[in-house]
Image (spheres, rainbow, N blue to C red):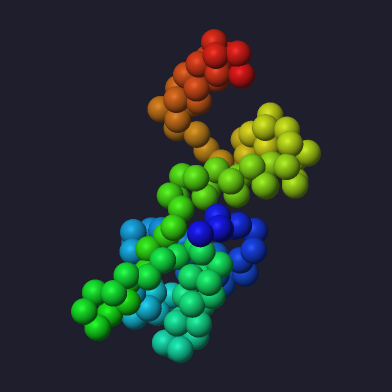
Amino acid sequence: MPKPELLDVSRREREVLELVYRLGSATAAEIQTALKDNSNYSAVRGVLSSLEKKNHLRIERDGVRYVYHPTVAREAASSKMLDHVIDTFFGGSLSLAVSAMLDRTDAKLSTKERRELQKMLRKASEDGQ
C-alpha cells in the first residue's frame, strides 16, 4: 500500500481526519455527530471514502458498521505536516518557526512549558543538533 501524502487532502478531509485521530477510530455517524455544521450522512461517507482511497484511513467492519482508523500514527503525520509548514513558510528554518510561535500575542508559556523547552534545547545542543 502506498504511503499517504498529507498534502493531498482538502480542508474538509483534514477536518474529518483530525476527528478520526482525536477519537482513535470512528464510524461515519460518529463523525457526522462531531462535525459542527450539520453535514449530511452521505457527505460524510463521501469524505471518508475519499480519505480511504488516498490511504489515510482504513476500514474495519464491526457487525453492520464500518469503523475508520488512521493508517499513519498521529505523531508521524503531524511531524510530516510540520516539516512542510516550516519548509514552506520559514524557508526550512526551525528557529524562525519557533520565533514566530513565541512572538504570537496569544502564546503564553507556563513556567513548566518554559522549563520543558529549555530542557529540550539543552538536550538538542548536547546531541549536536
Q: Nearer the viewer, residue 122 or 5?
A: 5
Instruction: Please determine whether, in this image, residue 48 is positioned above or below residue 83.
Output: below
Q: How many marks?
A: 0
Q: Quadrant of residue 67?
A: bottom left
**125 or 45: nearer the viewer:** 45
Q: Position of residue 55 (x, y in %)?
A: 51, 64
- Which residue is located at x 43 percent, y 49 percent? 73
Is any part of residue 104 visible from this angle? no
- The residue sitting at 75% across, 47% down in the picture is 88
Left or right: where 16 falls relative to 22: right
Left or right position of 75 against 81? left
Residue projecting furthest to the front: 1
Horizontal and vertical percent position of residue 72: 46, 53
**Relative height, residue 102 to residue 2 (above, below):** above
Tell me the residue at 52%/38% (across/down). Answer: 108
Is residue 79 something one can see in this rendering? Answer: yes
